């Protein structure tokens, strides 16, 4: 159980973990590494901007990631049977970000998160697939900033010690330059 003074925000972007009430989580075991990575994008040109020509080293890295994913999230596939019962205890405000063209995790899973988390808000990002934070980094970051501003307005106070945190899951979006490539 988290200490009571733990007052961070939670951001879930296309999150697995709940069994979707409608549709299925895309099974990465039945497609190639490249096809699975491409399925995360609404716009295949965005995939190319971010990954360029996929190298053998990148394919090896994706294979290792897939193997680890299978090891930790296989039984059952990509969801937890206990998670729905635990989410009601989360006290942090939550932003659920979903791409309108997510082919990996159905939006019904995002709707379930929004219904089960007491202080949750679901935002759908247009022209985005599962990899919202890479494909539409600016829109994803904007959604996180709006949550932060709304929280501040609701409390009519400043965050205090932490300064101006924006949901740190979306900080990865800040590491993408305008060309869509990750900065080191």
Image (spheres, rainbow, N blue to C red):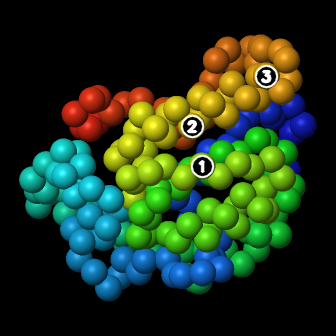
Question: Which residue occupies the foreground of this view, 179 or 65?
Answer: 179
- What's the residue at 43%, 77% (across, down)? 26
Q: Is residue 60 visible?
A: no
Of helix, strand and loop, which one carries label 3? helix
**In the depicted structure, whether residue 99 falls above or below residue 160:** below
**In the depicted structure, whether residue 124 falls above or below residue 35:** above
Of helix, strand and loop, which one carries label 1? strand
- What's the residue at 69%, 24% (across, down)? 149
Residue 35 lies, in percent from the top left, at 24, 72
Residue farthest front in this picture = 126
Q: Is residue 39 left or right of residue 110?
A: left
Label 2: few (<14), some or many (≥20) within 10 Å?
Answer: many
Q: Is residue 39 left or right of residue 138?
A: left
List the residue tagged with mark 1. Answer: 123
List the residue tagged with mark 3. Answer: 153
**Badge 1 vs badge 2, beta-carbon distance below 8 Å:** yes
- What's the residue at 72%, 58% (across, down)? 114
**Residue 159 figure quarter:** top right
Sequence order check: which comes first, mark 1 or mark 2?
Answer: 1
Residue 178 lies, in percent from the top left, at 27, 29
Q: Give how far apart the Cα atoms at labels 3 and 1 are.
A: 19 Å
Q: Give how far apart the Cα atoms at labels 3 and 2 are.
A: 15 Å
Q: Give how far apart the Cα atoms at labels 1 and 2 are.
A: 7 Å
List the residue tagged with mark 2. Answer: 143
Residue 184 lies, in percent from the top left, at 28, 29
């Amino acid at each position: 159980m988290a200490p009571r003074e733990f007052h961070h925000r939670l951001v879930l972007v296309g999150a697995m973990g709940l069994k979707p009430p409608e549709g299925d989580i895309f099974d990465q075991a039945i497609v190639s590494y490249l096809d699975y990575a491409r399925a995360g994008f609404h716009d295949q040109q965005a995939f190319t901007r971010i990954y360029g020509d996929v190298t053998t080293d990148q394919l090896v890295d994706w294979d290792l990631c897939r193997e680890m994913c299978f090891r930790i999230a296989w039984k059952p596939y990509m969801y937890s049977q206990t998670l729905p019962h635990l989410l009601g205890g989360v006290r942090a405000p939550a932003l659920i970000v979903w791409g309108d063209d997510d082919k990996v995790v159905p939006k019904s899973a995002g709707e379930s998160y929004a219904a089960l988390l007491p202080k949750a808000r679901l935002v759908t990002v247009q022209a985005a697939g599962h990899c919202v934070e890479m494909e539409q980094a600016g829109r994803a970051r904007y959604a996180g900033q709006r949550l932060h501003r709304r929280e501040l307005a609701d409390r009519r106070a400043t965050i205090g010690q932490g300064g101006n945190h924006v949901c740190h899951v979306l900080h990865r979006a800040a590491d993408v330059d305008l060309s869509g490539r990750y900065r080191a």
